[in-house]
Image (tube, helix red, strand yellow):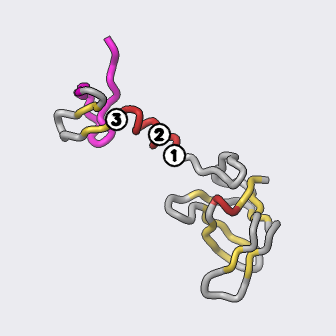
Amino acid sequence: MSTLPPCPACGSAFTYEDGPLLICPECAHEWSPAAQETAEVADVIRDANGAVLADGDTVTVIKDLKIKGSSQVVKVGTKVKNIRLVGGDHDIDCKIDGIGAMKLKSEFVRKV
């Protein structure tokens, strides 16, 4: 007998299968086991080369980035130390010397 995973919405252990879906009788949440696995993989933040990023990493900017609302530019090759990963579109929180606190997109950096 196979054991089914608990409900991701309420944590109930009383889940059951109905065709390709798993259903929770307590909160009526329906989900696909395959979709749950891809959602867990999607939480990983990767740089422009595909390397996995983590809090505290050092990265290098791979493209000149204009700073919105300012005439300053973050130049190619700027090293950013001690990054912090956050959710959202701009998924890196950091402090750049000479500029200050910024948010960057992971697609414009590469891990050092």
Element assignment for label 1: helix
Question: Residue 79, percent across and down?
Answer: 79, 64
Against 24, is 94 above or below? below
Neighbour class for label 1 at 10 Å: few (<14), some, many (≥20)?
few
Spatial CA span between label 2 and label 3: 10 Å
- Residue 5 magenta: yes
- Can you identify the residue that label 2 sits on? 38
Against 66, is 48 above or below? above
Asked if residue 107 lies left or right of residue 75, the reply is left
- Can you identify the residue that label 1 sits on? 42
Q: Earlier in the sequence, mark 3 or mark 1?
A: 3
Magenta: main secondary structure: loop
Q: Residue at x 61, y 87 (%)?
A: 69
Neighbour class for label 3 at 10 Å: few (<14), some, many (≥20)?
few
Spatial CA span between label 3 and label 1: 15 Å
Q: Quadrant of residue 35?
A: top left
Q: Which mark is residue 87?
A: none
Q: Residue at x 50, y 62 (%)?
A: 88
Question: Residue 38, percent across and down?
Answer: 47, 39
Which stretch did the figure color magenta?
1-18
Neighbour class for label 2 at 10 Å: few (<14), some, many (≥20)?
few
- Can you identify the residue that label 3 sits on? 32
Q: Residue at x 74, y 56 (%)?
A: 110
Against 97, is 55 above or below? above
- Residue 69 magenta: no
Question: Viewer-proximal residue, 20 or 75?
Answer: 20
